[in-house]
Image: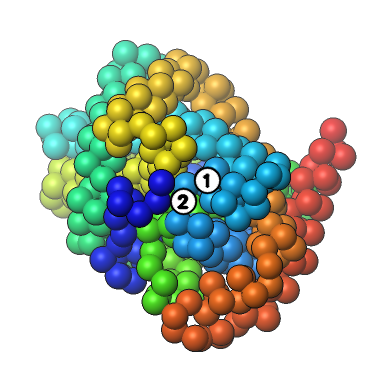
Amino acid sequence: MSGVSRGSWSGQVGFVLAAAGSAIGLGNIWRFPFATSQNGGGAFVLVYIAAVVLVGMPILISEVLIGRSAQRNPVGAFRALAPASAWPLVGMLGVSAGFVILSYYAVVAGWAFNYLVAAAGGRLTAPTTAGAQRVFDSLTGSAGRQIFWEAVFMVTTIVVVARGVEAGIERASKILMPLLFAFLLVLLGYALTSPRAGEGLEFFLRPRFSELGWGGVLSALGQAFFSLSLGMGAMITYGSYLEQEHSVVKAAGLIVTMDTAIAILAGLVIFPLVFTYGLDPSAAGPGLVFVILPEAFVRMPASGFLATLFFALLLFAALTSAISLLEVVVAYLIDELDWSRATSSWGAGLVIFALGIPSALSGSFLGWADWIASELMLPIGGLFIAVFVAWILPATTVRSEYEGASGAIRGFRAWRFCVRFVAPVAVAVILLQKIGMF
Ligand code: PHE
């Protein structure tokens, strides 16, 4: 099953770019700011960073190890590494999470599409926060427009995935990510010099733990999984295209650093502007960046051009993430059911499009799907992935996979300690606390 039809990355750089492309997306720029705003600001950010370092990075390494040693999709990987066991169910959970996440992800990406076209047509002219809010509300109140843009985004994703890993993903990840980063730096300069920047920074950076609670801690953990594309096998799938000679640890370190930098940067841009424009951060929901950024652009010189460029870059980032979500499902269909890549991509993609329609019809459905996926499916999947690598895979396999052909064993003991104890205990305790509260 593996081998002939699988293909692989053109070396370490190709893998890092594609995995970073998966990680960096709406999770960083859309989800992280509004999750922070709903959970009291600075305390959420601190817990988020702790979750990224102590849980996210170790699980990221684990997923890549599983994928690379099995050379298969998430279900097939568990089946190959633990034959005649229930472990493939963890892979199935991941494939299901791929369906759920991509369904509403495409709706939100569709919003970005709508703003892109509006900006390019010179129609982003809301000069006030209330006006910008009305523009967003009218979009999310229109099933027709949302479903139309959701369809445009899904078809784009399907076409790229149908063309295969090499042609589709890798080429796309190379140029535009650094551009997005540079663009955010420019916005940062603008935001930090805005009148009420100080209050925004204080909200974003000063921890107020009393406002967090176990619900907020679970949200921060879920945000870490979501943002790093963990817990559902995306990194297992991408790892399965990575060759032996490359160092997993170095790659993981780069991916985590870039992803976290973009999220923090997004926060540093958004919150000064939130306060400057007089928005109540804790009341702002998923519309946060779609209200704040257009308003900022409208006040800048060359606003149409800047807004167009920004939404194009955001869409591109969303596309490389969506590709990885669809790729999990498609790799499963190709490896396990022997479907062709084209049939798998179109078949799964169209089903996911249909599953997304309820999220386009109802914001609360979208929120609910997002909650199920990021605060339940991903952490539970991640918990099992950590346990599998730490306690089920033979220690010798784990060690030799960790080294790769490079022979470098840097950080092995710290990593092993995290996957054996820290990550599973943290996820389990946080999930149980949250359940216990209700
Ligand atoms: N990490 C992506 C983002 O931040 C979303 C994603 C989640 C992608 C899970 C793949 C798997 O936008």
Residue 30: quadrant of the picture: top left
Q: In this view, does 279 lie to the left or right of 86?
A: left
Mark 1, Cα crowd under 10 Å, few <14 / some 14-19 / many 20+, is many
Q: Quick one: SS at disc 1?
A: helix
Residue named by callout 1 = 76
Decide which of 377, 413 is in the foreground and name it: 413
Q: Where is residue 119 in the image (x, y as percent from the top left)?
A: 19, 37
Residue placed at 77% from the left, 45% from the top? 431
Decide which of 39, 55 is in the foreground and name it: 55
Q: Can residue 409 be seen in this view?
A: yes
Residue placed at 87% from the left, 40% from the top? 436
Q: Position of residue 248 (x, y in %)?
A: 47, 72
Identify which amino acid the numbered label 1 is placed on: Gly
Residue placed at 12% from the left, 32% from the top? 121
Verify CB contact (< 8 Å) between mark 2 and mark 1. Answer: yes
Residue named by callout 2 = 72
Q: Note whether 359 is above or below 430 in the view shown.
A: above
